[in-house]
Image (cartoon, rainbow, N blue to C red):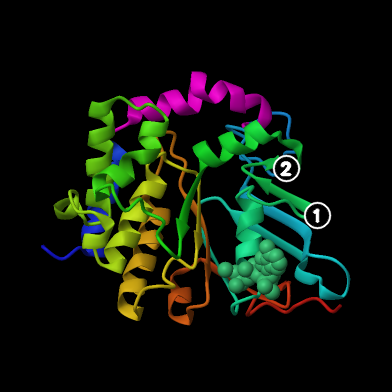
Amino acid sequence: MGVPSVESGFVYVNDVLSCGLRHDAAESRHGEPRAEGRGGYWGGTGATTEHTDGGRGLTAHMVEIEDVHRTYGRGPTAVHALRGVSLTVPRGELVAVRGRSGSGKTTLLNLVGGLDAPDSGRVAVDGTDLASLGEQDVLALRRDRIGYVFQSFALLPVLTAAENVGVPLRLRRTPAAEREERVALLLALVGLSEHAAQRPGELSGGQQQRVAIARALANRPALLLADEPTGQLDAETGHGVMELLRAVVRDEKGPDGEGVTALVATHDESLLDLADRVVELGDGVLREPGRVSSPL
Ligand SMILES: Nc1ncnc2c1ncn2[C@@H]1O[C@H](COP(=O)(O)OP(=O)(O)O)[C@@H](O)[C@H]1O
Ligand SMILES: [Mg+2]
């Protein structure tokens, strides 16, 4: 039991679902902190699609990308990173984007995360066209609805594992007792309860990425964006991290029953069997292996 395992993660996922932060989550999803978002991206004025679930007005797709182009620079040195990419990610699925280094994976994830805007085409997250949002609404979307996991972990080196996981909760001024309870559940979820007091430098790469995943889940995001989350890990550790993401997407549910959706960029072939769907980026164009592509 001393070794963090995905099996223990399965058990703990249910703990995370059934207790902790119900109050916080209910408040953040239905109360004051969300009010500003409602007009913007939460069933608000954005360009919602026609595919709704009929009940809560949620669109069927967490992410919709339509004919997106993104070119860096101009003239003869311009790099066409994305050349007409379309992709939909249904709610509750884990979609992997594979492709060699330089194929445009990070560019695509940055567009979905609102860190960058396309030159043309449309990116909708959670039913809202990002182009219809002001800067504050994009920030709110990223803070409240999206969790990020990076190849380089991006943990704060002076903070302990527990403190790193608690950062998003502090930013939302979650009361200390609630924060500690949630942090403990999240560390248990990722199998690191016994390492709560250690700093990133005292943890292995795989452990650090587990801390980063726990942190990404702290605010109960609807969407996880993971950019080569296993890129700095050995194969076995990387597979464990991917299995953890798989478990989270399968089992984690918010208080309103909403699951987590994940878009994961990777060039690691061994991880692809864990995805619900795999798409491949190459030369700025998306292909779906196994599907007959339409003639150009
Ligand atoms: N800020 C930038 N300025 C210029 N070129 C860039 C920039 N970011 C990425 N690129 C180029 O765009 C292409 C796609 O990059 P990227 O999206 O990072 O691919 P990947 O994540 O698959 O490695 C590459 O050719 C890269 O060099
Ligand atoms: Mg990249």
Is-magenta flag for residue 22? yes
14, above or below 178, in the image: below
Q: Quadrant of ligand 2?
A: bottom right
Q: Left of 28 or right of it: where is 286?
A: right
Q: Is residue 215 magenta?
A: no
Q: Where's residue 27, x and y in %?
A: 43, 23
Q: Is mark 1 within 8 Å of ligand 1?
A: no
Q: Is ligand 1 less than 8 Å from the beta carbon at label 2?
A: no
On the question of residue 207 being in view, the answer is yes
Q: Residue 155, labelled with which disc? A: none
- Residue position for label 1: 121
Q: Is residue 279 visible?
A: no
- Under mark 2, the amino acid is Asp
Secondary element type, mark 2: strand
Report the residue marked by disc 2.
Answer: 129
Query: Magenta segment range?
Result: 19-42
Structural distance between the alpha carbons of marks 1 and 2? 10 Å
Q: Quadrant of residue 129?
A: top right
Quarter of the figure that contains the C terminus: bottom right
Quick one: label 1, few (<14), some, or many (20+) residues within 10 Å? some
* Amino acid at pointer 1: Gly
Instruction: Determine the image quadrant of residue 213.
Output: bottom left
Disc 2 crowd rating (10 Å Cα; few below 14, some 14-19, many 20+) is many
Residue 168's spot in the image, x, y percent?
Answer: 40, 38
Q: Main secondary structure of the magenta part?
A: helix
Work out whether 97 lies above or below 180. below
Q: Which residue lies at the image location 51% right of the left edge and 38% below the top edge? A: 143
Vertical order, 81 against 27 (above or below): below
Give the farthest residue toward the left. 1
| Residue 145 picture location, percent across and down | 52, 40
